Image: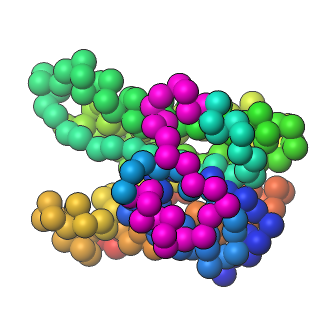
Amino acid sequence: MANLGSSTIMLTGAGGALATAIAQELDDAGAQMVLVGRGESLARAADRFPATEVLDLDLTDPASIDALKKVKVDTLIHTVGTFTTQDAQKATPADLRALFDTNMTSLFHAVQGVLPHMLKQKDGLILGISAGQAARLSGPKAALYTASKAAVAAYVLSLHDELKGKGVRGMVLYPMGAIDTPTNRDAGLAWDTMIDPRGLAKSVAHALSRPDRAHITEVKVYPDA
């Protein structure tokens, strides 16, 4: 098991299925956590996991940047995201805004909040969750989702190349299929065609434990089927 006892990690989307699996792995590894989320989901996460701070913030709102700047963390794990599908000809400007606001704008605001401290201490890691469609650069009936998740990957990898000389690294996690969540099970997806969120969480913890001279920048995790 990874030992993250010296790390303070900000986990966004706290209370979500993937974030909960990651939080459990981080807690088991001894990390200090700052939980960022909304409403009841955040409250449930705060009840379950010890946290140095709990922040109820809308990360699509630029005002969240100033709130995050008050918190000092070594690592940002950004799990905020949404998935929708639509036929290309039926996609609307509202669909575009919703997907890019939730998947990309929220990441931008989170990074702008934590980056000043990371640059000051010359140490940090920014981890973004992309998607299999983005890794393949193709998502039929999910073109906007694919584009927004490709933006996540391009942004994080660009940050990595720009800032690694200053001690701040980036990493992209690509779940190469649907994640096993209650929502996806309710949608009728078979459990053996989905990715175990605990496996994704272990991949995250492993990547966080790597030394600078053996860092990981991209990880693709596949379902069994």
Is residue 32 part of the magenta span, yes or no? no
> At 12% from the left edge and 24% from the top edge, which residue is drawn?
90
Q: Which quadrant of the structure image shows residue 41?
A: bottom left
> At 44% from the left edge and 60% from the top edge, which residue is drawn?
43
Q: Nearer the viewer, residue 122 or 51?
A: 51
| Percent x, y of residue 27 | 61, 74
Q: Quadrant of the C terminus?
A: bottom left
- Please give the range of residues in magenta: 41-65
> At 64% from the left edge and 30% from the top edge, which residue is drawn?
66
| Percent x, y of residue 190 | 19, 71
| Residue 9 in view | yes
Task: Reply above or below: 115 against 46.
Answer: above
Number of numbered discs: 0
Task: Reply above or below: 163 against 20.
Answer: above
| Percent x, y of residue 120 | 86, 37
Q: Nearer the viewer, residue 81 or 207?
A: 81
